[in-house]
């Protein structure tokens, strides 16, 4: 079984994120916006609307955050909304998961399809030198998922690179970078009031009923 490299110490997280040209705070804000959208769903919405709201807003926020930076662009290969950086050889996809930043690796809330399996497999061929030439693909990116979860008012988030997808679920991870842990959330809620006002960071996360 693949054992991931887990980056969880505050001193290492931002150093690792420098390779993406992103900050921990920027990724935390994406997670907050996604869960705020999820909690806007009411009992009058269709079933699973909250999950879709989180995915849609999380993807939008991910794109707004990255596309203003050098080298990043939108990508919808295989019908999967993402952002890519060709110079860095990186693709990032938003993902709702059951629980991030836990000893147990996160699982996707919705099962991953064949398209997701193909792009992840293509992006991990560099791990197996003897398999590289067996896959005829035009572009091979490291595929990363911004994995976001929520439990009542608690948000957790990690930026992680899966090893593969098997039986519609992540099968091991190469690397996991903890972005938003329980401790982080307590620090942020102490500093900010999450109320609706003109400050973009002050976002209500109150669940609607």
Image (cartoon, rainbow, N blue to C red):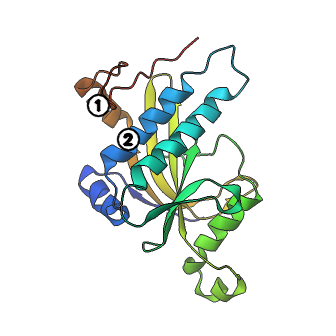
Q: CA distance from mark 2 to mark 1?
A: 10 Å
Q: Residues within 10 Å of mark 1 (few under 14, many from 20)?
A: some
Q: Quadrant of residue 192?
A: top left
> Would residue 49 be found to the left or right of residue 59 on screen?
right
Image-based side of 18 in relation to 54, left or right: left
Q: To which quarter of the image does residue 204 belong?
A: top left
Q: State the image coordinates of residue 132 (x, y, percent, origin top left).
A: 63, 85
Left or right of 68? Residue 86 is: right
Which numbered disc covers residue 28? 2
In the figure, 83 relative to 38: above or below? below
Q: Nearer the viewer, residue 4 or 88?
A: 88
Q: Are marks 2 and 1 in contact (CB under 8 Å)?
A: yes
Q: Residue at x 37, y 62 (%)?
A: 20
Q: Is residue 70 above or below residue 179?
A: below
Q: Is residue 101 visible?
A: no
Q: Please tell me the numbered disc located at residue 188.
A: 1
Q: What is the number of callouts on the image?
A: 2
For residue 141, say whether it is visible: yes
Above or below, comparing residue 68 to residue 196 in the picture: below
Secondary structure, mark 2, is helix
Sort mark 2 into few (<14), some (14-19) or many (20+) by Cα contacts within 10 Å.
many
């Amino acid at each position: 079984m693949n054992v991931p490299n887990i980056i969880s110490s505050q001193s290492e997280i931002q150093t690792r994120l420098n390779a993406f040209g992103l900050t921990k705070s920027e990724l935390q804000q994406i997670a907050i916006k996604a869960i705020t959208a999820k909690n806007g769903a009411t009992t009058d919405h269709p079933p699973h609307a909250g999950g879709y709201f989180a995915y849609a807003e999380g993807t939008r926020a991910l794109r707004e955050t990255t596309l203003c930076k050098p080298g990043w662009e939108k990508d919808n290969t295989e019908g999967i909304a993402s952002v890519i950086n060709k110079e860095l050889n990186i693709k990032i996809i938003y993902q709702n998961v059951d629980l991030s930043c836990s000893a147990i690796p996160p699982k996707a809330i919705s099962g991953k399809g064949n398209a997701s399996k193909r792009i992840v497999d293509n992006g991990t061929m560099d791990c197996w030198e003897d398999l590289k030439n067996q896959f005829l693909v035009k572009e091979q990116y490291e595929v990363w998922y911004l994995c976001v979860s929520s439990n009542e008012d608690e948000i957790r988030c990690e930026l992680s690179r899966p090893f593969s997808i098997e039986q519609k679920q992540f099968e091991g991870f190469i690397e996991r970078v903890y972005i938003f842990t329980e401790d982080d959330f307590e620090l942020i809620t102490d500093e900010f009031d999450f109320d609706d006002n003109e400050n973009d960071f002050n976002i209500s996360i109150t669940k609607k009923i």
